Image: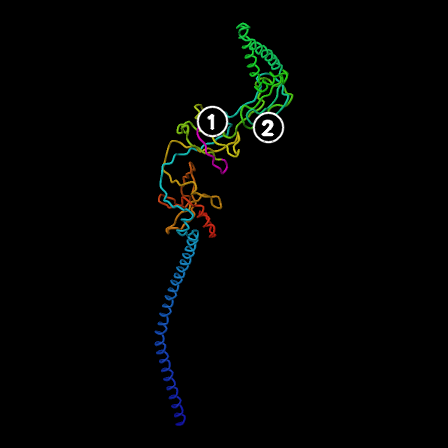
């Protein structure tokens, strides 16, 4: 019994010690756990710092965005560099050798230009119609449609009964007059002398009026040709045969238009305008004719004082030199007529504006550095008397004080082309 009691006490003691040991272990674990929680909290704080750090990384991303902005800025700089690349730098010696002159733009008084439609017409003062003065029949043609003829050149031969009668009377009057002159005033009466003279002169004038020229009359009176009623119409001026309205053998009446001969070296252009605009124009004002891409100088020679019943417009007659036969009657053109009104505008010599590769107008503008030039596109409003009125186009600002090449612009443009740059700037 005692032995059993000892065994029980021993077991109980062992269990108590085990329980105490477990309690201490749990206490230690709790202590450790409490010690660890601040560490975890610190780690959490560190993590939050890390999150803040990530936020900073996001800010860093913003920095990257800024970096991208910088990249874009660099790209813009490159683009700006391209604009700068579209320049050429000339040395003073080059500019002097090429005769390049750079001048600042200034505002000057420029006459207002009136734009109006116009029609090309023959110069009536240099146009003739070839027609018989008596009824006749066409027996021969000497000139053809479109042919250039000289003054006095034969155009057409006609035959007429009236002309044959006139030729016969001229022959008789000529013979009588020669006989009377040979006898003299001492032999014949004064009345016969006067009558013979008047009959001859009247017969001669009648033959001329019917259409015989002096050469034909001379040949007739020398009996080198017969009084067959034939006569030839000749050109009264040099020009081109523009109309040819007959066939050989045709019988025509007096006044019938056989041919039209026109000197097309100068032409008329009839511009149509409202009376108010015509009132701003004076005879003698300069003008231009726009023919496709060409500008032909002209001059105002007449202002009409009547209105067209249909359009209620008045005509302004311009005279223009027809070089290289570019103008023909009936063509429609655009006219630019200088008025007496004036306004302020930028003006440069005509040689200062050039066509780019794509056909735009441009001027050579000096940059901040002397001798550095760039092609700038402009709008040419008018070219007259060797001067061009210009204004900026799009983003290109042209203002008073802008320094442009007024002489030697073609050389600068060529230098830009050599550099491989596009010499147009939109």
Residue neighbourhood size for the residue with mark 1, other residues' Cα within 10 Å, grouped as few (<14), some (14–19), many (≥20): few
Q: Residue at x 37, y 84 (%)?
A: 21
Q: Residue furthest right?
A: 249
Cα gap from disc 1 to disc 2, whole angstroms: 35 Å
Q: Quadrant of residue 249?
A: top right
Residue matched to label 2? 145
Mark 2 secondary-structure assignment: loop
Q: Position of residue 231 (x, y in %)?
A: 60, 19
Seen in the image, is 50 located left or right of residue 190?
Answer: left
Please identify, in this view, whether the residue under mark 1 or under mark 2 is nearer the observer. Answer: 2
Residue 311 is tagged as 1
Task: Single out the residue that lies furthest toward the bottom.
Answer: 2
Q: Is the stretch drawn in magenta largely helix, strand or loop?
A: strand
Within 10 Å of disc 2 (Cα), the crowding (few <14, some 14-19, many 20+) is some
Relative to 229, is 49 on the left or the right? left
**Residue 420 position within the rendered picture, expressed as x and y whole percent measured from the top left:** 48, 52
Give the residues in magenta. Answer: 291-301
Going by the image, does 174 lie left or right of 102? right
Q: Looking at the picture, how far across and down is residue 411, in whole percent?
A: 45, 47
Q: How many marks?
A: 2
Query: Quick check: marks 1 and 2 in contact, CB under 8 Å?
Result: no
Q: Is 321 above or below relative to 411? A: above
Q: Which is nearer the eye, 400 or 185?
A: 185
User: How are the residues colored?
Assistant: rainbow
Is residue 299 inside the magenta stretch?
Answer: yes
Disc 1 is placed on an element classified as loop
- Mark linked to residue 226: none
Please state if 175 lies on the left or on the right of 21 as rendered.
right
Look at the picture and state if 109 lies above or below 412: above
């Amino acid at each position: 019994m005692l032995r059993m009691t000892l065994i029980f006490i021993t077991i109980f003691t062992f269990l108590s010690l085990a329980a105490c040991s477990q309690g201490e272990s749990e206490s230690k674990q709790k202590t450790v756990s409490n010690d660890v929680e601040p560490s975890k909290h610190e780690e959490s704080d560190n993590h939050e710092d890390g999150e803040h750090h990530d936020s900073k990384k996001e800010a860093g991303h913003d920095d990257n965005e800024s970096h991208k902005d910088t990249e874009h800025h660099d790209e813009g700089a490159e683009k700006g560099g391209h604009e700068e690349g579209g320049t050429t730098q000339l040395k003073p010696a080059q500019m002097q050798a090429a005769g390049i002159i750079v001048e600042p733009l200034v505002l000057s008084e420029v006459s207002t230009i009136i734009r109006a439609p116009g029609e090309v017409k023959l110069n009536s003062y240099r146009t003739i119609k070839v027609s018989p003065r008596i009824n006749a029949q066409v027996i021969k043609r000497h000139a053809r449609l479109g042919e250039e003829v000289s003054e006095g050149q034969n155009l057409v031969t006609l035959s007429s009964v009236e002309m044959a009668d006139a030729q016969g009377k001229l022959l008789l009057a000529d013979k009588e007059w020669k006989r009377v002159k040979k006898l003299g005033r001492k032999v014949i009466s004064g009345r016969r002398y006067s009558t013979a003279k008047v009959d001859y002169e009247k017969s001669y004038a009648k033959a001329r009026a019917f259409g015989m020229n002096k050469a034909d009359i001379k040949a007739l009176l020398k009996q080198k040709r017969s009084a067959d009623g034939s006569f030839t119409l000749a050109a009264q001026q040099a020009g081109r045969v523009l109309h040819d309205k007959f066939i050989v053998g045709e019988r025509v009446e007096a006044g019938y238009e056989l041919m039209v001969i026109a000197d097309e070296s100068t032409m008329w252009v009839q511009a149509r305008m409202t009376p108010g605009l015509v009132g701003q124009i004076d005879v003698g004002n300069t003008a231009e004719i726009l023919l496709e891409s060409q500008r032909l100088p002209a001059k105002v020679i007449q202002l009409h004082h009547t209105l067209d019943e249909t359009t209620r417009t008045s005509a302004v007659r311009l005279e223009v030199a027809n070089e290289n036969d570019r103008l023909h009657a009936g063509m429609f053109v655009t006219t630019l007529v200088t008025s007496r009104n004036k306004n302020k505008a930028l003006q440069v010599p005509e040689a200062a504006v050039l066509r780019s590769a794509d056909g735009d107008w441009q001027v050579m503008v000096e940059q901040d550095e002397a001798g550095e030039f760039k092609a700038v596109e402009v709008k040419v409003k008018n070219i007259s008397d060797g001067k061009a009125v210009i204004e900026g186009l799009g983003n290109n600002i042209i203002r008073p004080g802008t320094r442009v090449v007024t002489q030697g612009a073609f050389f600068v443009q060529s230098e830009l082309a050599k550099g491989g740059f596009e010499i147009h700037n939109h």
